[in-house]
Image (cartoon, rainbow, N blue to C red):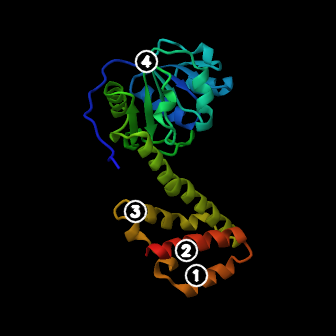
Amino acid sequence: MRKLSYLRSITIHSVMKIVLIGSGNVATHLGGALQKANHQILQVFSRSKANATDLATKLNAEAISNLSDVDKDADVYILSIKDDALESVILSLPQLKGMVVHTAGSVAMDVLIGFDKYGVFYPFQTFTKSTQVDFQVIPILVEGQNKEQTQLLFDLGCELSNNVLKANSYQRGQLHIAAVYACNFTNHMYRLANEVLDKSELPFDLLHPLITETAAKVQKLSPYQTQTGPAARNDKTIIKKHLSAISNNDELSEIYKVLTDSIIRRC
């Protein structure tokens, strides 16, 4: 597979006029970062006028809830919406002079092929509106339909982050799958662990030091080197004891067995 490639940054000196299509977690943080980089957010679109107004007010932009009201003279249109809503929104957009990009990891760039200029601007992070993030450390993956558009997106990314690289649609899709394992599934494991502790009347924060240490170690060593626990040791006695303790919960038991077998096979 072709490796992710880095480009040389060419600093953008002019203020870009940007329209945000979406008002959710990604749009909120991305809009703030773009404004901090002195770009002008012209409009924020959301089907919910209240949501559009909430973000637009923070960004000194116009709130719109009808795609026919989109400013046709912006430089960049950023679609930060749910993946399953992309197609309908794209079909509803008028023909635009500026560059149209989406921020999805698992959606190919070619979904935007109907526009004259298009690409992908993918900030690789989990976003929550109420949680502040440091955009300078967030990887941004870009792709344009030609070298000129790719370079424009790369340069824009470099104004927000110190970690910008080019990645094609296949690579972004694979990264998104990896993120589901590393983030979404891991968080679900935290939730299941919390349920186990709740039944024992123990607080979840007992796990905080363990979670912090595990996350710190994997940033210095490979996951293969940091794997510990009864499955890594193939400690059949402890594994059997654990399964007996949760035998009244089929879901927990099944997940425990699947993950234990997977770890044993790889250790």
- In which quadrant of the rendered view does residue 137 lie? top left
User: Where 89 falls versus 161 (above or below)?
Assistant: above
Residue 148 visible from this viewpoint: yes
Q: Do the residues labelled 2 and 4 touch (CB within 8 Å)?
A: no
Give percent across and percent down for residue 212. 46, 62
Q: Dot 3 lies on which element?
A: loop
Q: Which of marks 4 and 3 is nearer the N terminus?
A: 4
Residue pictured at 46% horizontal, 42% vertical: 133
- Give the number of the mark in front: 1 or 3: 1
Kindly identify which residue carries mark 1. 239
Residue pictured at 27% horizontal, 32% vertical: 9
What's the amino acid at mark 2? Thr
Kindly identify which residue carries mark 2. 260
Q: Earlier in the sequence, mark 1 or mark 3?
A: 3
Kindly identify which residue carries mark 3. 218
What's the amino acid at mark 4? Asp
Q: Dot 4 lies on which element?
A: loop
Q: What's the distance in space between the residues labelled 1 and 2, CA to CA?
A: 8 Å
Q: Do the residues labelled 1 and 2 touch (CB within 8 Å)?
A: yes
Q: What's the distance in space between the residues labelled 1 and 4, CA to CA?
A: 58 Å
Residue pictured at 57% horizontal, 41% vertical: 130
Kindly identify which residue carries mark 4. 75
Q: Dot 1 lies on which element?
A: helix
